[in-house]
Image (cartoon, rainbow, N blue to C red):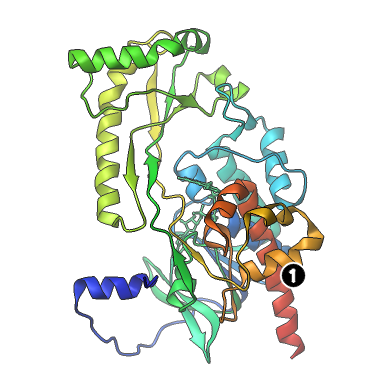
Amino acid sequence: MSTNILERTSRAVGKEIILSGRRTPIYRSVDVLVCGGGLSGVAAAVSATRGGARTLLVERNVVLGGNGPLSFDLALASVDAGFAAEVLKRLEQSGDAGRDLFGDGLVHDPEALKYVLLDLVQGAGVQLLLSSWAADPIIREGVVRGAMVENKSGRFAIPAAVVIDATGDGELAMRAGAPMRALYEPATIAMNYRIGGVHFARALKGQADWPRRIAEAKGSGALSSDQPDTLALYGVTDAARERGVAYVRGPSCRIDGASTIAHLGEQEARARTLIRGFLPFLRTLPGLEESFLIDVAGAMQIGRLRHVVGGHVLRMDEVASIREQEAMAETVDPCLRPRGLSGLLVTGRAVSAEPAAWQALGAGGSLALGERAGTLAVQDLAALSAT
Ligand SMILES: Cc1cc2nc3c(=O)[nH]c(=O)nc-3n(C[C@H](O)[C@H](O)[C@H](O)COP(=O)(O)OP(=O)(O)OC[C@H]3O[C@@H](n4cnc5c(N)ncnc54)[C@H](O)[C@@H]3O)c2cc1C
């Protein structure tokens, strides 16, 4: 099956138009252009800048952090080296990371993470362009040499010696014609939300009774039948407990790689409506009588859509190698380089990896891959200026 979404779209629509060339202003020329300011993109940009490269980070949202904080995915790996450890240390020092009272391992406050990433980016001297969409790669003689960026001011070219695709879905790699492995696997994704006013001691005592109370409310019509059958709180560190704040795993839906954006949008609207309908019931439970909605996650995020196919495809038995400096060059570096394409590195969610291997990497893995991509970009830059 073709993995090119552009081909699939034009096949589905059955029509296409030819756009003529147009003059485009140059926003800025840089050594390294990083597209996407999630965990991996931030790590890549900081690492490239610290390595001496003039680096521009382009992010479509108004804030850094990506998929994880946006969807209230709060899991963190306990790491003791590299950029990932730097991020973790800052979160722990401010009391914004810790063990989850509800047993979800190490978790963090997503707002605090966004600030930590912003501080690291600014502290390193990375140039930052927010609210801007990296649209198309600029390709010269088969080599990626920058990207076209769109924002409210218009369309711009950003020439760069090396481009790092950290968009999470390998958007630039795909448009540059890199081989991609699309995943059509079904997944369950949830619209999570955050509540305040929780009295944890009483809530924890009554927890075992929640499924029965939900079933009863559904039976009596107090809750509609399409509401979730379970209630699960998570993301409660000591600091969150003191503040009476918890995250709730919200209504979910099944999607797969063939789901359209329109379908996802319908599910997001449906989930938001369900959350509003659930809140009055929530306040009937012991310990949650005074609970109130703080905010709903920015989006229902799909964990993975596709992986680029690189010089090597990371296997499950090689996952540990991302933490071993000696193994990096042999095992990890070829995974960051799309097969048959130069000038572009692909890091983060779309990295060249077996789906299970990527899943095992975790958020710490995204940071480690990004950091390595930044290092490789600096090496490539040095090689370019030597020629
Ligand atoms: C449902 C779900 C499942 C998860 N499953 C896993 C898992 O199995 N394994 C795992 O390791 N981690 C998983 N995570 C955790 C975590 O989200 C990821 O590890 C981490 O977010 C990946 O970081 P990233 O930087 O690669 O991608 P993202 O966090 O997706 O960051 C990509 C960034 O690029 C930006 N962007 C996208 N396109 C463009 C564009 N064209 N121009 C400019 N900016 C752009 C986005 O706004 C975003 O900020 C999951 C998270 C969620 C929500």
Q: Which residue is mark 1?
A: 52
Residue 44: image location, x then y, percent = 64, 62
The answer to whether residue 235 is above or below residue 57 is: above
Residue 259: image location, x then y, percent = 30, 55
Residue 213 occupies quadrant: top left
Residue closest to the eye, 179 or 302: 179
> Residue drawn 32% across and 41% down?
253
The answer to whether residue 315 is above or below residue 342 is: above
Residue closest to the eye, 189 or 26: 189
> Residue drawn 75% across and 80% down?
382
Residue 283: image location, x then y, percent = 34, 14
Q: Is residue 235 left or right of residue 266?
A: right
Residue closest to the eye, 347 or 48: 347
Residue 149 seen in this snapshot: yes
Give the quarter of the figure containing the C terminus: bottom right
> Residue drawn 75% across and 52% down?
82
What secondary structure is found at the residue carrying circle 1? Answer: loop
